[in-house]
Image: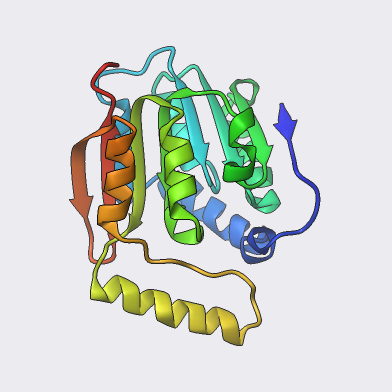
Amino acid sequence: MDCCTPGDSPFDRQFDARHAARHLRAYREKGAVGLTRALVESLAEGGIGGQSVLEIGGGVGAVHHDLLRSGAATAVDVDASRAYVAVARGEAERQGHADRVRYVIGDFVTLADEIEPADLVALDRVVCCYRDMAALVGRSASLARRRYGLVYPRDSWLGRAGTVLLNLELWLSRSPFRVYAHRTDDVEAILAAHGLVKRLSRTTLVWQLAVYERPSA
């Protein structure tokens, strides 16, 4: 089942068909790698048979494809890039679980009231693409029944410098798209306010993975 919002967007222009095709080739060659692989493994730890998945900004769908293969029953992928939804849907068909995924095209924060809660919620390199971090993290956290995982830039001078340079490149190319370096303390405070407790944290030079759990689950 698909749902969509009309019109072009900065996400459509930045994450176009060429961008999506390149990432799909990488996924088919190597699968989920690095912190994405760690995110999947942590969300699936202990078994997820029959559980539901919500992936926000799923790209080619690496997280929900792998969680469905690990036993999850259903998934919803909300993405503002039509090109990415197209390749994620195609990959779901190739892997044989297209009937268990609902694809929703549009801004998650705008569409959040239409999205059902899920056992597992994932945002892999999405927070850095959204200006209103508080709305994105808060609305998505409220939908997590069991676990919540995200990969986003480390709150460091290197991350902030990288954001400045990337935005300069985007400005020079006349792209309306921008990236953001949000403070880790602010992200963690919002998740704590929604009753989620951190159970895993890993970092690379630029990125950090954090996985949370709802104690009452």
State the residue in front, 70 or 76: 76
Q: Residue furthest top?
A: 50
Figure check: 182 above or below 73? below
Figure check: 183 above or below 100? below
Q: Position of residue 126 (x, y in %)?
A: 46, 52
Q: Report the quarter where the N terminus lies.
A: top right
Q: Residue at x 62, y 66 (%)?
A: 14
Answer with the quarter of the image where residue 141 lies: top left
Q: Position of residue 121 (x, y in %)?
A: 42, 33
Q: Position of residue 21 (x, y in %)?
A: 61, 56
Q: Is residue 209 left or right of residue 119?
A: left
Q: Residue at x 68, y 59 (%)?
A: 12
Figure check: 50 above or below 135? above
Q: Residue at x 41, y 18 (%)?
A: 71
Q: Position of residue 153 (x, y in %)?
A: 33, 61
Q: Residue at x 39, y 45 (%)?
A: 32
